[in-house]
Amino acid sequence: MKRFQSISVLLSAITGVLVVLLVSVFTYTAKQAYDRRETAVSLLKTVDVLNDVFATQEALRFEQGEMSTALEQSGPADVTTRANIENMHKAAEKALSETHQRSSVEADGPIRNRTKIRQARTLYEKRHADALASLGQPLAARPARLQGDWSDSVNGIVAAINLRTRERSLYIADASAFNNEMTKVIRLVWATRETVGRDRRRIAEAIINGKRLTSDQLQQFAEQGGSVNYPWAVLESDRTDLPTFPAELKRAVDDVAKVYFGQIRATRRKILDALAAGKPSPLPVSEWLGESDQSLKAITDVSRAAFSLTRADVVKTLDQ
């Protein structure tokens, strides 16, 4: 009888241990699931913030290019040009405000670098007002430093908001191999977009100037072309060689190959050849800007597709 009682006690003890073990395992598993969910929620906010940051940079760069080109013109800007610049400024302001709001939610507290961003934005607003006011004057009457001050103010605010993206991009890249690949794509695309944007603006300035290009200028344009070729060659290689390269990205990359490398590069070459020979540009500056806008948008669409794919991957993790 005692033997049966001891077995019963032993079984009860074993059962108790198993219950405790199961509860511990379930608790640990639940904690892991909760932590993964919180990480995915935080990651999703970060992806949205970075998407806003890059959209803001694009709006600022478009405004910068349009204003800088207008400031190079010899006469006062016409009504259409001024209205276009004002609309671009409103779009940039809206993008800045939305990025600030979403960053506040994502940070769940004070935003690092906020003071520097606020100072850069205040200067950007002042330089915009100064530049816009001067558009009613001929080139000779505008302050000598106006063009440089305007460009510096835009570069300053882009640099200020971009400081946050470097740290957060690494956070996204570390989340998964797929996100790491998409982050690489985004950075390559924006390196390309920045270079193409500067090149576009300098060609517009050369068209307005109308003078024969010097050997130094031709060398600079050649270097800018090379600076575009390298990062894009990396992206083209991934598009061709990686079997996991998403179809959405392939379409966006192919569109850039068609619009920028197939069309705009050819137009760019004709303009540079004409200016190098001391002849007028075959295109007026307004047509050049209009055509080259399409290439900038096509390049930016690649990063938009990469952001969309990254967000979908994070949402999938969150659902799981």
Image (cartoon, grey):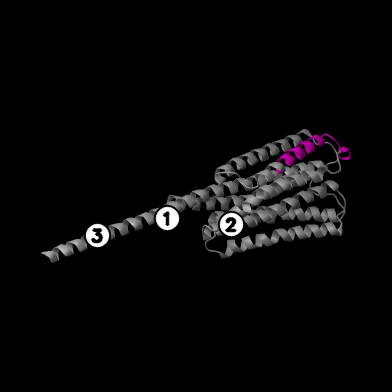
Q: Residue extending furthest right?
A: 140
* Callout 1 amino acid: Gln
Indicate which label's residue lies in the foreground, 2 or 1: 1
Q: Earlier in the sequence, mark 1 or mark 3?
A: 3
Residue 32, disc: 1
Answer few, some or many: residues within 10 Å of disc 2's Cα (few below 14, many 20 plus, some between 14 and 19).
some
Residue 170, disc: 2
Q: Is residue 272 magenta?
A: no
User: In the structure shown, which secondary structural element does the residue marked by tag 1 occupy?
Assistant: helix
When the figure is inspected, residue 221 is found, relative to residue 64, above or below; the finding is below
Q: Which residue is mark 3?
A: 15
The residue lying at 66 percent from left, 59 percent from top is 232
In the displayed structure image, the side of residue 34 where residue 259 appears, left or right: right
Distance between the Cα atoms at labels 2 and 1? 22 Å
The residue lying at 21 percent from left, 59 percent from top is 12
Q: Is residue 123 magenta?
A: yes
**Magenta range:** 120-141
Task: Answer with the quarter of the image where residue 182 lies.
Answer: bottom right
* Callout 2 amino acid: Leu
